[in-house]
Amino acid sequence: MKDQAGAPTDEAIRRALVQVGAGGGDLASVTRPLLDAVRAVTGLESAYLTAVDWDRQVQRIEIAENAGTLAIEEGLEVPWSDTLCRRALESGQHVTEDVPGTWGDSSAARDLGIQTYVSVPVVLPDGAVFGTICGASSSRVHVDAETESLLAVFGRIIADAVVRGQQLDEANERAGEADRLLRARSQFVAAAQHRLKTPLTVILGWASLLVEDDGTMEEEDRQTAMHAIARAASHATAEVRSMLSESEAAALALDVSVGPVDVGEIARRCAKDLGALSAAHHLEVVVDPEAPRAHSDAEVVRIVLEHLIENAVKYSPDGGDVRIDVGRSDAGRVRIAVCDAGIGLPSGVDIFAPFTRGVDRDVIPGSGLGLHVVQSLVHAVSGEVTARRNTHGPGSTLTVLLPRAVAS
């Protein structure tokens, strides 16, 4: 087989590999020379790389090299169910010189006018299919088994580039999260100093009076001093415990270990463990049997659920229901929704900021750190958390969205 300029196939491949080695290592600089080589050694008009969004069930043309009348546009999205790639993967037939006769039911292929087609999947080390590397032409072109093998080799090279890109993105994300946590830590320490200043001042003031008493202090004043010290010490202890909890969560956020997680099972276990939190509240867990597993950290999910359930119980009146729903979002992610029948969300307040509270401490005790911990942990596993007032009835709903685990 010769390329279009008459040079040996090996030379076209060698040139491509040299360009790949000299490039920046990103997906585009690795892929484009390989696609050029595919066109050169096969005579096909178009060679392109696709990515499959399994959540949306859509195939996207990521990178394309075109010549001749057939033009596969970068950025083009096609429903996965209508693609030639799906048909090739499911049938095991990766090459055809008669697309209309083989897969005439593909409207995308008809619209593009594809006659000859070859593709191989780009499979990542964990077995997940990233997408496909393909060649196509509007005319009949002979494609042999050697070409299919070449695409398979190129697919492995591209898979390595995809993994390197993902690792770089994850490293950058971790670095950004670490920087954010360091800034938050500075703010946290400043706020903690402020929060502890009052109870410690109270303790020191009353303790000094007791120490300096020469026996003339009235018993009533003595009792007042001791009760004030006890209240302030209790307040300070609660603050310190909350800060330790937040510190542990921050450390966990920097060292998450992700994998497939059964969120429904963790939700049931948390509700059972926390059922004794208040006999006056009813905890209900509803798990959609179609809910996918999350790509997350089981310990993170447990802590997040515990904080959300405790928060819902705390702000709900006696006799109120707390409902924990686990299901699938419209975008295919794992959705956790904790709904209470409490006082609702305060207006104009960022409830996820540290030390933020919706009501006065004397009404409902707490440090204002619980939801801040939730947000930090959810972000650490590439998730999202939002809060809204319930549209029907009292209370609020906090929703967590987590990436779904890739089906094995």
Image (spheres, helix red, strand yellow):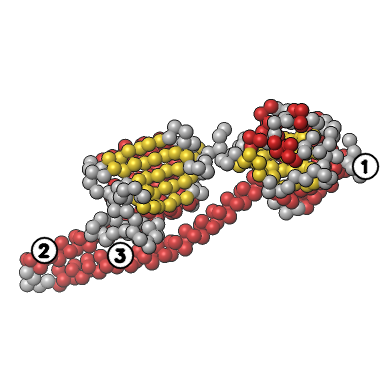
Question: How far is disc 3 from disc 2 in space, using C-alphas?
Answer: 23 Å
> Could you tell me if the residues under marks 3 and 2 are in contact, i.e. CB atoms within 8 Å?
no
Give the mark nearer the N terminus: 1 vs 2: 1
Asked whether, in this view, residue 213 is left or right of residue 270, the answer is: left
User: Which structural element holds mark 3?
Assistant: helix
Q: Position of residue 297 (x, y in %)?
A: 47, 43
Q: Which circle, 1 or 2, is nearer the viewer?
A: 1
The residue sitting at 62% across, 48% down in the picture is 166
Name above or below for residue 138 compared with residue 101: below
Report the quarter where the C terminus lies: top right
Q: Position of residue 357 (x, y in %)?
A: 32, 59
**Residue where numbered disc 1 is placed:** 6
Q: Which residue type carries mark 2?
A: Gln
The numbered mark at residue 145 is none
Compare marks 3 and 1 and give the one earlier in the sequence. 1
User: What secondary structure is found at the residue carrying circle 1?
Assistant: loop
Residue nearest the observer in this picture, 6 or 246: 6
Disc sitting over residue 223 in the figure: 2
10 Å crowding of disc 3: few (<14), some (14-19), many (20+): some
On the question of residue 384 being in view, the answer is yes
Q: Position of residue 221 (x, y in %)?
A: 10, 68
Mark 2 neighbour density, 10 Å: few (under 14) some (14–19) many (20 or more)? few
Three-letter code for the amino acid on which mark 3 is drawn: Leu
Q: Amino acid at mark 1?
A: Gly
The number of discs equals 3
